[in-house]
Structures are given as C-alpha cells and as structure tokens.
Image (cartoon, rainbow, N blue to C red):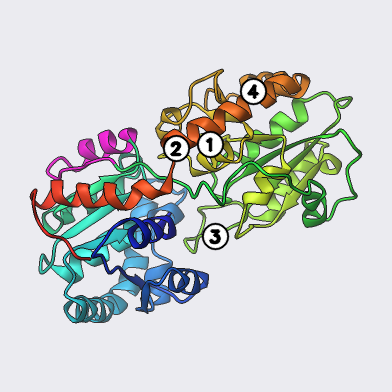
C-alpha cells in the first residue's frame, strides 16, 4: 500500500516531493526509486525489530509482562541511539509532514520528532484489539497531529482507542492497470506449488495472504476438507511468513502438516509469496478471503475484484465495506467453516454465477479502488488535520 501511496503522490499531485525513510534495506528500496522517490535507510537494530506484542503469546498476563520487560530491557539500549539517528534525518529533511506507516513507525517517529514537524499516523490496524499497542499509541498521541484510517471501521475503532486525534478516512486503492482481467496461465500455480498439472476443467480455489495466524489458513484448509472428494477442484494457499516478530505467524511446515492431518495433502498446493500477485489472481477461478478477525481493509479482496475474480469475503470490519453481497462478491461470517463451505460449493457448481460476480467486481473496483485518487485524498486529509488552506510540500 505504501508503494500505491507514493505512486499516486508522484503521478496525481503537483508540487509534492516524497522521501521514503525505511528501517531496513530490501526490495522496497528499488521499487520506490523506480517511482522517482528518494529513499533513505535508517537500519532498525535487531533488538527493536523483533519487539512486539504479537510474540507475547501464552503464560498469562504476568508472563506476558515479564517477557515484555525482558525484551524491552534489551531494546532500550538500542532505542536511544536509533531515535537520535531518526531525529537527525527529520531535521535534515525538514518535511512539511511526517507520514508514519506502521505501529513501530508511529511510536518511533513520535519519540524522535517530539512535535518538531507535523506528524500523521497512517492507521492500518484495529488497535483496540491489541491492549499494549492501544496504551502506547494513546500515550504517544500528544506527539502526533492526527491519523488517517484506511476504512470507516478502522476510524471508529481508533477514535475509541485514541480519542483526542482527528481521523479522516482515506480508503486503500489498487493499480487498476496492473490488477485487471486478462488471460493467465492457470498451470503456473501448479508449477509454483510443485504439483502435477491439474486436468482441464478443474476449478482452482485460492487464499492469498501472509501467514499471520488470523488470516484464516486453518479455516480454508478445513473448508477444503469439507468439499466432497468427487468435485473437480484444487486448493492453493498462497503467501508466506513476512513478519520478524516471533509467534505472530504460521510456518509452511505447520500448514503442510495440518493439511496432511485432514487428509487433503494431495489436493492442496502451497505457493510461496509472490511479489507480483496479479497473475495469481487471474489463474484462480475463486478467491477466498477467510480472515477470522475483522479485516482493517482487505487489500486482497480489492485486488481480486479488480482482476474480475469471483470472491468470497469474510464479512466484517473494513472488508465488509468493499462489496455488496450477491452482487459483486459473496460474504460469510468470519471463522464459520460451514457457511464458507456452503458459499464455496455454490460457486463451484455455478460457473455463470462466478462470471457475473467477476464482471460486477471489476465495475466496483473501477468505481471505488482507483489508485489515482490516493494522493489527492491524502492531501485533503492532511489539510483537514493540520488546518485548511495550508500549503503542503512533503
């Protein structure tokens, strides 16, 4: 999403000069530079990179607090030095707005900046679900000017958790040229998953997500096991572990073993993370969104709809704002295996319905998800937060 924001700022807003500060060098550097965006890397020490509330699983409240204190003690030695480096970058750039993207970025930018420059947090998460993060953001909120939420659901949640900040909504978007209905080599999924080529006429069903534990891979595999063996279908779990915080995600080995325990190992392919997923969407007949917690937005839903796919959506949170049930996608209650299986059987058995949903999904994407609006919408949000009429150059 950060690349989409940068692309729209460069292409659709005049007199804007974004500079991207990254906590580590990686593929994002080259991609941002290809958009004409200047990039600086302020390497985050490992003790800070691995610190997070997602890894504090089990052991009760006292055990979690103890592990947090131990992790925080190790991180505190690295924190002061990193904040000095980050503050030096801010004063060297002298930005009109610091746009912080991600929970750690929100907190680090607030502590390093200390209100020297306007600070806006881009909120991608339901912070009320994470007590530690909610507490830290509320404590740091006097150091921020406002926040931008990616959906109405996220805005309502954030205002409940951090009531003092203004929170305009700027919904996520996708590149409608890149994510578009086009022909694709469906057999590419079999090659990527290391499976024999599926026979002609098979219905390919996929879940595309990071391996975060709430993204619903277990639910998806349970649904795959519930589909009668006689159906000409093949399932694909597409994605991988991307987080550095311990305990926040599945491993491939865990998911493979779970598929085997359900007796569906031969009908499920595991496709590694794809940097460019557009062809993966197009290779699927049905895209399943199975998040067990409310989704803040549901980017995979928007991307799949833009590609003209039939999509089944976990109908909660920001994802519920993206579609009209039965018109451009189908919905199901989060975590409800039986309901999801019923909707999936409906689509497997009705290719005409798949086609109608896909056609309408593309129309919805053109109306709601066009990336060109992101830059102008953000500038309007900055003006709302910082004062109307302010001349902003980032």
Q: Residue 295 carries which label?
A: 2
Residue drawn 90% across the image and 50% down it: 196
**Cα distance in 3D space between marks 4 and 1:** 24 Å
| Mark 2 vs 4, N-terminal side | 2
Q: Quadrant of the N terminus?
A: bottom left
**Cα distance in 3D space between marks 1 and 2:** 7 Å
Q: Which mark is residue 291?
A: 1
Residue contact between numbered discs 2 and 3, judged by CB atoms under 8 Å: no
How many neighbours does mark 1 have within 10 angstroms: few (below 14), some (14-19), or many (20 or more)?
A: many
Q: Quadrant of the C terminus?
A: bottom left
| Mark 4 vs 1, N-terminal side | 1
Look at the numbered disc 2 and give the secondary structure of its residue.
loop
Residue numbers of the magenta segment: 152-169
Name the mark nearer the viewer: 2 or 4.
Answer: 4
Residue contact between numbered discs 4 and 1, judged by CB atoms under 8 Å: no
Name the mark nearer the viewer: 4 or 1.
Answer: 4
Residue contact between numbered discs 2 and 4, judged by CB atoms under 8 Å: no
Is 164 colored magenta in this rendering?
Answer: yes
Look at the numbered disc 3 and give the secondary structure of its residue.
loop
Q: Mark 4 sits on what residue?
A: 356
Residue contact between numbered discs 1 and 2, judged by CB atoms under 8 Å: yes
| Mark 3 vs 1, N-terminal side | 3
Name the mark nearer the viewer: 4 or 3.
Answer: 4
Q: Can see residue 341? A: no
**Cα distance in 3D space between marks 2 and 3:** 18 Å
| Mark 2 vs 3, N-terminal side | 3
Residue 128 at what x, y percent from top left? Answer: 30, 40
**Cα distance in 3D space between marks 3 and 1:** 17 Å
Horizontal side, residue 349 vs residue 375: left or right: right
Q: Mark 3 sits on what residue?
A: 242
């Amino acid at each position: 999403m950060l690349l989409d924001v940068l692309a729209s700022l460069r292409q659709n807003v005049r007199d804007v000069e974004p500079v991207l500060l990254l906590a580590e060098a990686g593929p994002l550097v080259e991609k941002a530079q290809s958009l004409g965006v200047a990039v600086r890397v302020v390497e985050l020490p490992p003790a800070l990179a691995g610190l997070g509330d997602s890894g504090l699983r089990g052991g009760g409240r006292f055990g979690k607090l103890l592990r947090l204190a131990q992790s925080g003690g190790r991180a505190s030695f690295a924190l002061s030095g990193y904040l000095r480096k980050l503050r030096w970058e801010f004063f060297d750039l002298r930005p009109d707005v610091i746009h912080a993207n991600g929970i750690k970025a929100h907190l680090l930018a607030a502590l390093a900046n200390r209100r020297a420059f306007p600070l806006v947090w881009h909120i991608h998460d339901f912070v009320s679900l994470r007590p530690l993060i909610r507490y830290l953001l509320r404590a740091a909120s006097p150091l921020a000017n406002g926040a931008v939420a990616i959906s109405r659901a996220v805005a309502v949640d954030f205002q409940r958790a951090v009531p003092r900040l203004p929170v305009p909504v700027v919904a996520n978007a996708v590149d409608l040229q890149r994510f578009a209905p086009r022909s694709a080599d469906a057999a590419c999924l079999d090659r990527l998953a290391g499976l024999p080529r599926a026979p002609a006429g098979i219905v390919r069903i996929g879940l595309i997500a990071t391996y975060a534990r709430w993204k619903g891979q277990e639910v998806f595999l349970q649904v795959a096991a519930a589909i009668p063996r006689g159906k000409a279908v093949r399932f694909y779990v597409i994605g991988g572990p991307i987080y550095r915080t311990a305990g926040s995600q599945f491993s491939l080995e865990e998911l493979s073993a779970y598929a085997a325990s359900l007796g569906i190992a031969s009908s499920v392919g595991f496709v590694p993370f794809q940097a460019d997923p557009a062809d993966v969407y197009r290779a699927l007949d049905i895209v399943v969104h199975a998040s067990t917690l409310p989704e803040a937005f549901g980017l995979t839903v928007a991307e799949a709809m833009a590609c003209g796919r039939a999509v089944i959506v976990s109908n909660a949170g920001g994802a519920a704002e993206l579609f009209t049930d039965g018109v451009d996608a189908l919905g199901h209650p989060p975590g409800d295996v039986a309901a999801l299986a019923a909707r999936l059987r409906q689509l497997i058995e009705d290719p005409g319905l798949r086609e109608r949903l896909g056609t309408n999904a593309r129309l919805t994407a053109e109306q709601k998800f066009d990336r060109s609006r992101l830059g102008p919408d953000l500038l309007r949000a900055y003006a709302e937060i910082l004062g109307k009429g302010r001349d902003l150059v980032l």
